[in-house]
C-alpha cells in the first residue's frame, strides 16, 4: 500500500488524529526523498492497558505509510522514574511488555516483521552513550530538566537525580536510534522541546515530534495504570470488561472527557474504518457508521444511548482482547505475568515479625509498615516557644490523646484545624521539639512556592478516630511497632507519597484508603505528602 501513496498522502496518514506535530516541514522533506524513520518508547513500569491501543493504532498508520518503526522498551528509564520498576524486576517486565505489545499488534493485524524492537539497556550502558549523558548534563540546568519531566516523571518535593536525568536520556535516544522523528503522547511535549533545544548543542540533528492526545479513561480523567476503575487491563476477563464499561463515565449527550467515545475515535475507526452501534430493533436496530463525526453528532443529540454505545464498544474491545487473552493462557506467559507483577498482598516468606506485609522483593519497604490512623483534633494551642509550631492534642482512639508538633501547621489556620478529622503517622519514635514531645506526625499535602500551600489530608466522610489507613494492595501487612530511625523507613517510603491530579492520596500510584474509601485533600493536585 505504501508504494502506491504519494508523499502528501503518506504525510496525511502519519499525522492523522495527532494533537500536535513539531517539525512538519522536516517530515515533508524526508518523505520526498525516502521513508520516514520513527520510534516510540515505553517505560516498562505498570502493566499496559487498553489505552495502549491508541499508540498501537498510530504505529499501524506509520507502517501503512511505509515508515521504518522502532519500538523501544525503556527499561533504564523505568528504573530512573523514582524506581517504579525495581532493578530485579526490570528484565522480567521488559519480557512481559515485549510479549503483550506483540500480542496487541498481532490482534490489530500489524505485521511484526516490519518492526524493530530494542531494549534501552542494550545501548544506553555503552561508553559513547554514557559520555553523551555527561556532555548533556553539563548543558542542561536543573530547572530545565525538572520542567521537561514534569508531566512524565513522578514529581516529589526533593527529587532524586535519577528523575532529572530521565528527559535528557530520552532526548539522546533519538540520536542513538537514528530516527527522523519521535512519537509519543502530548504529555511528553516538554521532553520533546528539550531534545530540540539541546541535541544540536551536541552536534546532533534536531528531530521532528509526533504527539497523540491524552485519551480519557473510563472515569472521565486520564486512563491510568494506578486507578483500577479508570482502565481495562489487556488480560481482564469479559466479565471485568463488562463491569468496568458499565461503570464508565458516559453521560447522555456529553462528548467531553468521554473515554468510551474517545476509544471509538482513536482506536476503532483508525483500525477498522467503521463502527457498528448494536441496539434493539425497537430503538432503530443496528447502525453502521463510517466516520466518527457522525457517531459523535448522534451521541450529542442523544439519538445514541450510552448503554448502546458501551455495549457496542464492549463487543469491539473483546474482539481485540480475545487473541491477547488466548496467548497469555500458556503456562510460560502466566508465569511471566505473575513474576513480573507479583501480588503485593502476599507476605514474603520468612519476613521478620513486625516487618510488615507483602511486596515480594519490595517487602523491605512495604507501606504497610507505616501505622497511619484517622485522628480527630480536640485542641489546638500556640506553641509557647516557637512562632511556626502549634501544639495539637488529637484523639486517635486511644485512652490518651496524642500530642503533635508540626511546622506545617503554621500554614493552616487554627479555626480550620479545630475538631477536624486528620491523618496521623503513629509509629515514629517520639521526639522533643522545642521542649514539647511530639508523639505522632500530622500528614499534610504541600506545594512549594510563595507562599507555600499546605492542606491536612482528609479521611472519608464518616470516619472515626483510630481507623486504620492502608495502601491498596497492602491491606494485610503488619505495621512496625516502632519505625527504626536509623533505617529511615519513613523517609524512603515518603518519597513516593503524593496527591494525584484527582486530589487522591497515593503511594507509588496506589491509593491510600480506609474501609470507607479514599484519602483525599481539597485542592492541592500533584502535592507532596509529608
Image (spheres, rainbow, N blue to C red):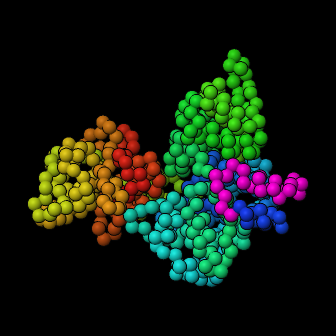
Residue 116, visible in the rendered structure: no
Residue depicted at 35% across the width and 62% down the height: 449
Residue depicted at 68% across the width and 42% down the height: 265
Q: Where does the C terminus fall, quadrant-wise?
A: bottom left
Q: Position of residue 242 (x, y in %)?
A: 60, 34
Asked whether, in this view, residue 77 is left or right of residue 499, the answer is: right
Vertical comparison of 312 with 175: above or below: above
Vertical comparison of 241 with 406: above or below: above
Q: Which residues are magenta?
A: 1-23
Residue depicted at 69% across the width and 24% down the height: 279
Looking at this view, name the residue that lies furthest to the left: 384
Looking at this view, name the residue that lies furthest to the right: 4
Question: Per the image, is 20 magenta?
Answer: yes
Residue 287, visible in the rendered structure: yes
Q: Name the foreground residue: 437 vs 527.
A: 527
Question: Per the image, is 102 magenta?
Answer: no
Vertical comparison of 362 with 229: above or below: below
Residue depicted at 56% across the width and 33% down the height: 254
Q: Position of residue 88 (x, y in %)?
A: 54, 67
Looking at this view, name the residue that lies furthest to the front: 25
Q: How many marks?
A: 0
- Where is residue 325, by image quadrant? top right
Q: Position of residue 281 (x, y in %)?
A: 72, 18
- Where is residue 27, by image quadrant? bottom right
Q: Position of residue 519 (x, y in %)?
A: 37, 46
Asked whether, in this view, residue 431 is left or right of residue 93, the answer is: left
Amino acid at each position: 500500500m505504501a508504494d502506491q501513496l504519494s508523499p502528501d498522502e503518506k504525510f496525511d496518514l502519519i499525522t492523522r488524529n495527532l494533537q500536535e506535530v513539531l517539525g512538519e516541514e522536516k517530515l515533508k522533506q524526508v518523505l520526498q526523498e525516502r521513508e520516514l524513520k520513527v520510534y516510540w518508547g515505553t517505560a516498562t513500569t505498570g502493566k499496559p492497558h487498553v489505552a495502549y491501543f491508541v499508540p498501537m493504532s498510530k504505529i499501524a498508520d506509520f507502517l501503512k505509510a511505509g515508515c521504518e518503526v522502532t519500538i523501544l522498551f525503556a527499561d533504564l528509564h523505568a528504573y530512573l522514574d523514582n524506581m517504579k520498576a525495581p532493578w530485579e524486576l526490570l528484565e522480567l517486565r521488559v519480557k512481559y511488555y515485549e510479549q503483550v505489545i506483540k500480542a496487541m499488534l498481532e490482534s490489530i493485524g500489524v505485521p511484526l516483521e516490519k518492526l524493530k524492537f530494542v531494549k534501552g539497556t542494550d545501548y544506553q550502558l555503552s561508553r559513547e552513550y554514557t559520555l553523551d549523558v555527561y556532555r548533556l548534563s553539563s548543558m542542561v540546568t536543573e530547572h530545565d530538566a525538572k520542567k521537561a519531566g514534569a508531566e512524565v516523571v513522578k514529581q516529589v518535593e526533593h527529587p532524586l537525580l535519577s528523575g532529572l536525568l530521565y528527559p535528557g536520556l530520552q532526548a539522546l535516544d533519538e540520536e542513538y536510534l537514528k530516527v527522523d522523528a519521535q512519537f509519543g503522547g502530548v504529555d511528553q511535549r516538554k521532553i520533546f522541546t528539550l531534545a530540540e533545544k539541546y541535541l544540536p548543542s551536541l552536534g546532533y540533528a534536531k528531530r521532528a515530534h509526533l504527539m497523540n492526545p491524552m485519551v480519557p479513561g473510563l472515569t472521565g480523567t486520564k486512563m491510568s495504570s494506578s486507578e483500577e476503575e479508570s482502565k481495562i487491563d489487556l488480560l481482564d476477563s469479559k466479565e471485568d470488561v463488562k463491569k468496568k464499561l458499565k461503570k464508565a463515565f458516559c453521560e447522555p449527550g456529553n462528548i467531553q472527557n468521554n473515554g468510551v467515545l474517545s476509544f471509538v475515535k482513536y482506536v476503532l475507526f483508525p483500525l477498522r474504518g467503521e463502527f457498528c452501534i448494536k441496539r434493539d430493533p425497537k430503538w432503530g436496530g443496528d447502525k453502521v457508521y463510517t466516520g466518527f463525526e457522525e457517531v459523535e453528532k448522534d451521541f450529542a443529540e442523544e439519538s445514541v444511548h450510552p448503554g448502546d454505545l458501551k455495549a457496542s464498544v464492549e463487543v469491539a474491545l473483546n474482539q481485540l482482547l480475545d487473541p491477547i487473552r488466548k496467548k497469555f493462557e500458556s503456562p510460560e506467559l502466566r508465569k511471566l505475568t505473575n513474576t513480573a507483577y507479583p501480588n503485593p498482598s502476599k507476605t514474603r516468606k520468612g519476613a521478620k515479625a513486625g516487618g510488615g506485609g507483602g511486596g515480594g522483593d519490595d517487602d523491605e519497604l512495604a507501606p504497610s509498615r507505616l501505622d497511619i490512623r484517622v485522628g480527630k483534633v480536640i485542641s489546638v494551642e500556640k506553641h509557647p516557644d516557637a512562632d511556626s509550631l502549634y501544639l495539637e492534642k488529637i484523639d486517635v482512639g486511644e485512652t490518651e490523646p496524642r500530642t503533635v508538633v508540626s511546622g506545617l501547621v503554621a500554614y493552616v489556620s487554627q479555626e480550620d484545624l479545630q475538631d477536624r478529622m486528620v491523618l496521623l503517622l503513629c509509629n515514629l519514635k517520639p521526639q522533643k521539639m522545642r521542649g514539647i514531645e511530639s508523639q505522632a506526625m500530622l500528614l499534610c499535602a504541600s506545594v512549594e512556592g510563595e507562599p507555600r500551600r499546605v492542606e491536612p489530608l482528609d479521611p472519608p466522610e464518616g470516619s472515626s478516630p483510630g481507623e486504620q489507613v492502608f495502601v491498596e494492595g497492602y491491606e494485610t501487612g503488619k505495621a512496625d511497632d516502632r519505625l527504626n530511625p536509623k533505617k529511615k523507613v519513613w523517609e524512603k517510603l515518603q518519597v513516593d507519597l503524593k496527591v494525584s491530579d484527582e486530589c487522591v492520596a497515593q503511594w507509588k500510584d496506589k491509593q491510600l484508603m480506609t474501609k470507607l474509601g479514599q484519602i483525599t485533600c481539597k485542592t492541592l493536585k500533584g502535592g507532596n505528602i509529608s
